[in-house]
């Protein structure tokens, strides 16, 4: 009905306004309407194996919290196309940027508009064109022998992987019909390509559709079916479609218990795809995901270039992967590890000993302090200005991202930027007003003194002991936390933060947001939060165990029933 | 009515078939019957406020200088050649900013700039510096309201161009300006090459190839729409709304497919934009010019009648390195009231944007249409999310209205309003494009009627 209103409005506007020329007279149209495909109601019960109805909530009544439908992010889209078709062309390049708050996979993204729908169409055309150049690889059978039989088999096999569940009979028939209609006037590759395009533009590909397993009428929350669970696991831990093992497990009904799900999670964390996910999380959490667009004043920082920024990205990725998969994966190590990763070029920039070669290699702290993520050049450069270190920004980074507290806003009419660099003073001295002016100091004491602790690293993340000829003073202070106190430099700061319960809880909340694509709700997620916090404490703050625990909450195992929201 | 019969009918969600051809038949007859030219509407955005005294023209309403030889470097000097075809409107405020949620001056400025109504808080509430990290403008933007009226016959209802108009995840309201409604945001295309591919590549292709492409796309999208229809019936709440919006977007794509056709007089497939990184700071001028070339050609070819060009975002951090600046735009804007160097550089930035605005007007003025030029039938509205960038002021927003839409706007004037509301400016814009029965826009508490003294 809304649709009709739109057209009626359009008609009115024509009558009232646009009796005009200058438009394209008689738009050449001639588009064919192929009809609407097979109609009818066949029921959608694509149900593999047993349902997940056997899982008990840990919260009494299942309390999944909000469970918004999630559309593939650009990153997930590329990963999925790679795993589905072996196409590593990153077709999402050029998709409009999207995101809710925090992470790119936040479900509260804006709706799809023309621009995105058009990009999906163009991408599907290009992907299909590439895929059909090698039908021998794409098709599971020889179409020469029995074309219709072979296409039917391909639709079934490919559909199960593209839509991450078996097609219903009705869906199978509709896709085959699209092929048959196309084949009347087109060659085999073109016809297959059109079916492929339809698969890739379908909501069943672009969205993670979760209808759940219908329970008692009136249930507010329902468990997921096994295929839906397979996708939850794969997109959380890998950022891509389920592998064959997950799909087979779903088909066999082996994703319906807590133990089965946690066992899959542990298996998946051993897979290289988990490393990709971990890097993706950390670069967003720690804010170094835009190093490729960093802008630094090269007059002030000779030797810096975007090549250095790219190496800092590699350094950061190598570091977090090492902590998570080679070292002990603890929060302590993340914040205090006395090592980083460099190659010869980056080592030369930082003034660290060359490890020998172009590959990133572990180097231990020497003269320069190193304290986990707190001393990563990419993190520090990302939270600096083009020409100055910006202690405010670095302090706010610690408060927001590591302590999960939002500082109160400054008055509307003050300069929110650091002062212009003064060659006759240290950065620290230039922020003195924040300490001396009572209008500023109340808030700025919460973050400026944290930021000062990073002053041994310049705006590009490079170690320094002097600034403008003055000795750097890296003394700082934590206030308003559970580990308040003075410190000097990042090593001491790292030790304090690593002992903070506030930081540990913040880390578990950051992973919550990333895993579930939404911000936690104090009211609705109490049980979910308690579950992961308890697991994190019990494991000695092991972040791999935190990831596993995120698969054991009501938020992961259930979803809000559409029936409770007016759906079918 | 013969034109009607050969048209394909679009099928709505409810199975109601309503024809595009009706619209086209109306339009097709327009030129023959000698009616007025089609209105076009373009928004041109630049950020971080202006230096008011360097922006104001010198002189009276009808006798004024944009370029004062005795005082070189005035911001609007590059517009001198177009002085007779524009209105410089000062004294217009964003009064709607006094209402509704939001505390950050850039959020408020950008979110209210084209919508003139209350912001809406997003799921994560209020964040750093009072930003609404995932909030939204609270209503449709003026360009989209105008597109509802004049954008339905063309391949593209509207086209949003950007130049490094990137989404800041923590400050989404500062990043976007075009909305069909709350949370229905229209992101701009920041890459000229991608814009070229989307909008122009099929112009001039072999007609039989185009026909085949259209048929293929329709057959695929019919299949996809069927998936959406069946699925949407099973969903509820906001999930269903999201997928309904996606389905509507697919229908918009179909409209653009339908309208791909032969070129008009003066319309040519533009040269493919150079392969440069659209995100590089130093490429900003070149990318902007490429986008303006495409925008002008999109209007010339009547691919769309509504367009926007968003230079960076509110709180723009672009560093004008090509002007020799080492400090970025936003930082300068907060120094300009105290530091003469920053003030001079902020003036240079706004002067540079005036050059760009003049370039776009020039492209439109070069295109003959009817008895005049395309510019004569277009409104190019230059907007800013602030008046003064240092204080984030909501008053004295520097509006320039270029073009006169077939004489509807009384151009060649420098009008100083006294505390006018930008809601009223947009009501006047709607009147200018023919929606003369519109009485309000945005927040009705601060809307009174079409801004007086603007329309003929």
Image: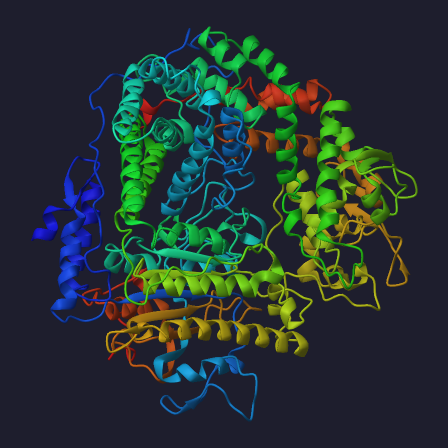
Where, by quadrant of the figure, is residue B42 drawn?
A: bottom left
- Residue at 79% in and 60% down: A427
Q: Position of residue A244 (x, y in %)?
A: 52, 14
The N terminus of chain A, quarter of image: top left
Q: Position of residue A57 (x, y in %)?
A: 49, 14
How many numbered dots are placed on residues in this image?
Answer: 0
A7 to A226, vertically: above or below: below
Along the viewing direction, whichever of B309 and A463 lies nearer the viewer:
B309
Q: Is residue A500 visible?
A: no
Q: Position of residue B11 (x, y in %)?
A: 19, 39
Residue projecting furthest to the left: B1
Along the viewing direction, whichever of B324 and B420 lies nearer the viewer:
B324
Where, by quadrant of the figure, is residue A204 drawn?
A: top left
Image side of residue A134 versus residue A504, left or right: left
Q: Is residue A40 visible?
A: yes
A188 to B35, vertically: above or below: above
The C terminus of chain A, quarter of image: top left
B367 to B124, vertically: above or below: below
Along the viewing direction, whichever of A560 and A264 lies nearer the viewer:
A264
Colouring rule applied to residues? rainbow
Along the viewing direction, whichever of A118 and B204 lies nearer the viewer:
B204
Q: Position of residue B89 (x, y in %)?
A: 39, 78
Image side of residue B304 versus residue A420, left or right: left
């Amino acid at each position: 009905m809304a649709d009709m209103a739109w057209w009626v409005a359009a008609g009115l506007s024509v009558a009232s306004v646009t009796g005009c020329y200058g438009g394209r007279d008689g738009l050449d149209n001639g588009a064919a309407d192929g009809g609407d495909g097979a109609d009818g109601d066949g029921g959608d019960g694509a149900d593999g194996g047993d349902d997940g109805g056997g899982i008990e909530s840990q919260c009494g009544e299942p309390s999944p919290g909000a469970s918004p439908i999630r559309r593939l992010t650009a990153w997930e889209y590329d990963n999925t196309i790679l795993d589905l078709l072996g196409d590593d062309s990153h077709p999402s390049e050029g998709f409009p940027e999207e995101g809710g708050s925090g992470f790119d996979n936040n479900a509260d993204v804006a709706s799809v508009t023309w621009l995105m729908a058009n990009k999906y169409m163009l991408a599907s055309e290009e992907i299909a064109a590439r895929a059909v150049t090698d039908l021998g690889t794409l098709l599971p059978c020889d179409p020469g022998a029995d074309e219709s039989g072979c296409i039917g088999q391909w639709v079934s096999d490919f559909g199960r992987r593209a839509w991450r569940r078996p097609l219903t009979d009705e869906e199978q028939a509709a896709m085959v019909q699209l092929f048959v209609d196309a084949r009347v006037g087109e060659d085999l590759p073109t016809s297959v390509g059109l079916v492929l395009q339809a698969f890739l533009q379908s909501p069943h590909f672009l969205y993670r559709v979760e209808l759940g397993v219908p329970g008692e009428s009136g249930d507010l929350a329902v468990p997921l079916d096994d295929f839906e669970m397979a996708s939850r696991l794969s997109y959380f831990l890998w950022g891509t479609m389920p592998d064959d093992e997950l799909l087979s497990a779903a088909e066999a009904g082996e994703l319906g218990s807590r133990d089965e799900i946690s066992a899959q999670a542990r298996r998946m964390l051993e897979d290289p795809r988990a490393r990709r996910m971990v890097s993706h999380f950390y670069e967003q959490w720690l804010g170094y995901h835009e190093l490729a667009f960093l802008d630094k004043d090269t007059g002030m920082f000779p030797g810096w270039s975007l090549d250095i920024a790219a190496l800092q990205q590699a350094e950061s990725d190598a570091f977090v992967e090492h902590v998570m998969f080679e070292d002990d994966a603890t929060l302590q190590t993340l914040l205090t590890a006395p090592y980083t990763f460099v190659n010869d070029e980056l080592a030369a920039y930082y003034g660290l000993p060359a490890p020998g070669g172009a590959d990133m290699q572990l180097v231990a702290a020497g003269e320069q302090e190193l304290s986990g993520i707190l001393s990563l050049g990419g993190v520090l450069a990302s939270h600096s200005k083009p020409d100055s270190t910006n202690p405010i920004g670095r302090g706010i980074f610690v408060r927001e991202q590591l302590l999960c507290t939002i500082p109160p806003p400054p008055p509307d009419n003050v300069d929110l930027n650091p002062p212009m660099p003064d060659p006759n003073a240290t950065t620290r001295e230039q922020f003195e007003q924040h300490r001396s002016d009572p209008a500023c100091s109340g808030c700025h004491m919460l973050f400026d003194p944290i930021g000062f602790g990073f002053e041994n690293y310049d705006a590009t993340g490079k170690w320094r002991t002097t600034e403008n000829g003055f000795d750097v003073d890296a003394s700082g202070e934590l206030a308003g936390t559970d580990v308040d106190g003075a410190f000097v430099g990042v090593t001491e700061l790292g030790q304090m933060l690593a002992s903070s319960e506030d930081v540990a809880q913040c880390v578990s909340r950051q992973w919550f947001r990333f895993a579930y694509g939404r911000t936690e709700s104090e009211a609705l997620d109490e049980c979910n939060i308690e579950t992961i916090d308890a697991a994190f404490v019990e494991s000695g703050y092991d972040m791999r165990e935190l990831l596993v625990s995120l698969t054991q909450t009501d938020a992961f195992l259930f979803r809000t029933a559409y029936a409770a929201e007016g759906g079918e | 009515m013969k034109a009607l019969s050969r048209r394909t009918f679009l099928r709505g969600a409810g199975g109601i078939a309503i024809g595009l051809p009706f619209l086209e038949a109306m339009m097709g007859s327009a030129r023959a019957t000698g009616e007025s030219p089609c209105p076009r509407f373009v928004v041109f955005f630049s950020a971080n406020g202006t230096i008011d005294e360097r922006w104001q023209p010198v002189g009276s309403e009808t006798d004024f200088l944009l370029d004062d030889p005795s005082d070189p470097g005035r911001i609007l000097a590059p517009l001198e050649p177009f002085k007779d075809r524009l209105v410089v409107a000062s004294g217009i405020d964003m009064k709607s900013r006094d209402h509704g949620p939001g505390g950050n001056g850039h959020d408020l400025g950008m979110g209210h700039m084209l919508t003139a109504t209350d912001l809406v808080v997003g799921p994560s509430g209020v964040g750093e510096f009072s930003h609404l990290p995932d909030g939204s403008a609270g209503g449709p933007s003026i360009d989209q309201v105008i597109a509802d009226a004049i954008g339905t016959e063309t391949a593209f209802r509207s086209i949003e161009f950007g130049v490094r108009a990137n989404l800041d995840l923590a400050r989404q309201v500062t990043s976007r300006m075009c909305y069909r409604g709350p949370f229905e945001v229209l992101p701009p295309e920041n890459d000229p090459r991608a814009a070229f591919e989307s909008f122009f590549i099929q112009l001039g292709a072999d007609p039989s190839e185009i026909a085949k492409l259209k048929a293929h796309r329709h057959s695929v999208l019919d299949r996809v729409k069927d998936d959406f229809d069946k699925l949407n019936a099973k969903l509820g709440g906001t999930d269903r709304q999201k997928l309904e919006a996606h389905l509507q977007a697919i229908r918009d794509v179909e409209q653009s497919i339908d309208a791909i056709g032969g070129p008009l007089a003066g319309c040519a497939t533009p040269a493919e934009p150079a392969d440069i990184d659209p995100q590089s700071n130093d490429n900003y001028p070149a990318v902007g010019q490429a986008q303006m070339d495409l925008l002008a050609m999109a209007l010339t070819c009547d691919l769309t009648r509504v367009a926007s060009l968003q230079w960076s975002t509110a709180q723009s951090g672009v560093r004008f390195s090509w002007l020799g600046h080492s400090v970025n735009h936003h930082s300068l804007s907060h120094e300009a009231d105290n530091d003469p160097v920053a003030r001079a550089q902020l003036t240079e930035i706004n002067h540079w944007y005036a050059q760009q605005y003049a370039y776009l007007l020039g492209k439109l003025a070069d295109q003959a249409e009817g008895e005049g030029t395309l510019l004569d039938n277009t409104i190019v509205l230059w907007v800013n999310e602030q008046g003064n960038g240092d204080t984030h002021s909501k008053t004295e927003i520097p509006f320039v209205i270029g073009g006169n839409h077939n004489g509807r706007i009384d151009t060649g004037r420098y009008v100083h309003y006294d505390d006018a509301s930008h809601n009223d400016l947009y009501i006047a814009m709607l009147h200018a494009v023919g929606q003369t029965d519109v009485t309000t826009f945005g927040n009705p508490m601060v809307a009174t009627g079409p801004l007086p003294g603007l329309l003929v």
